[in-house]
């Protein structure tokens, strides 16, 4: 029987601006409002990106602390995951420093980004383990999965850090995710004992996520990857996307019980 997936909202990402979508949350107060609204309609967690005064992607510890405080106050029972994404700005030492200084409860870490400084890889994951940070490894394809499994086998990644998220498609150059890309990688990852989540760029986002849910994966939805509904309309806000996915998952769950 299909289990109910954990749903994470990724409300802004590193690149979109409010000129792209007026409903994009950027400030700490906007993220707090979004977290509360998304929690009400079924989000279990929020994937946080913070921005500097010019709206640019940032790994600033103080900005994260302000955002985490605001979100925690607005939605005290939502899980908060920060990103260590480089976005072409930050190097591995900066990503390591964020984990060391912030000590977040949860963080996403792209293995292909950490591989830019392989001599620091073990230190990155050891720091997370020491601080009790739940790492979610970002996988963009088979090469990333190969790298992660190699690091697990060689103890560069501690064996209990086995959460991962598969990203279908990409932001730049634009490439939409497709459900057909799911099966081989998900099966292989699950056979290796990874706890898998999935997110997808493009208008087929919800189709991809429902296929992933049917394979036992958790899901991530939100404006970081897509703001277009299954019927082609533009979501007004992230809560609409979460609500639609939650309802679609409930229907899928009911069908699977028949």
Image (cartoon, rainbow, N blue to C red):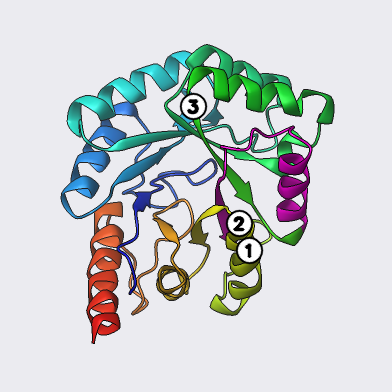
- Indicate the position of residue 251 as horizontal and vertical percent values: 23, 77
Give the labeled residue for mark 3: 133
CA separation, marks 2 and 1?
5 Å
Q: Say if 241 sits above or below 61 in the image.
A: below
Instruction: State how far apart marks 2 and 3 are (Cα).
Output: 27 Å
Question: Which residue is painted at 50% across and 59% down in the image?
Answer: 198
In the rendered image, the quadrant that contains the C terminus is bottom left
x%, y% of residue 206? 40, 71
Secondary element type, mark 1: loop
Q: Nearer the viewer, residue 120 or 26?
A: 120
Q: Position of residue 13 (x, y in %)?
A: 49, 44
N-term-proximal mark, 2 vs 3:
3
Q: Residues within 10 Å of mark 3 (few under 14, many from 20)?
A: many
Q: Quadrant of the N terminus?
A: bottom left
- Mark carried by residue 174: 1
Image position of 130 with respect to 210: above or below: above
């Amino acid at each position: 029987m299909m289990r109910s997936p954990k749903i994470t909202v990724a409300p802004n990402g590193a690149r979109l601006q409010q000129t792209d979508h007026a409903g994009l949350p950027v400030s700490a107060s906007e993220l707090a409002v979004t977290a509360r609204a998304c929690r009400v309609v079924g989000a279990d967690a929020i994937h946080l990106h913070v921005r500097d005064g010019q709206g640019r992607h940032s790994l600033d510890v103080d900005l994260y602390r302000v955002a985490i405080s605001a979100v925690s106050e607005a939605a005290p029972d939502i899980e908060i995951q920060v990103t260590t994404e480089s976005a072409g700005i930050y190097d591995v030492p900066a990503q390591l420093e964020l984990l060391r200084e912030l000590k977040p409860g949860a963080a996403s870490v792209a293995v292909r980004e950490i591989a830019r400084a392989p001599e620091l890889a073990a230190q990155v994951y050891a720091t997370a383990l020491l601080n009790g940070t739940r790492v979610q490894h970002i996988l963009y394809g088979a090469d990333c999965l190969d790298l992660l499994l190699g690091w697990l086998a060689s103890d560069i990644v501690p064996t209990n850090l086995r959460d991962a998220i598969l990203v279908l498609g990409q932001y730049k150059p634009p490439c939409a995710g497709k459900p057909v890309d799911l099966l081989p990688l998900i099966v292989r990852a699950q056979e290796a004992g990874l706890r898998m989540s999935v997110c997808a760029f493009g208008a087929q986002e919800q189709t991809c996520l429902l296929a992933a849910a049917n394979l036992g994966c958790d899901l991530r939805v939100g404006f970081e990857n897509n703001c277009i509904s299954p019927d082609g309309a533009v979501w007004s806000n992230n809560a609409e996307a979460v609500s639609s996915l939650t309802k679609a998952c409930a229907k899928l769950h009911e069908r699977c019980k028949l």
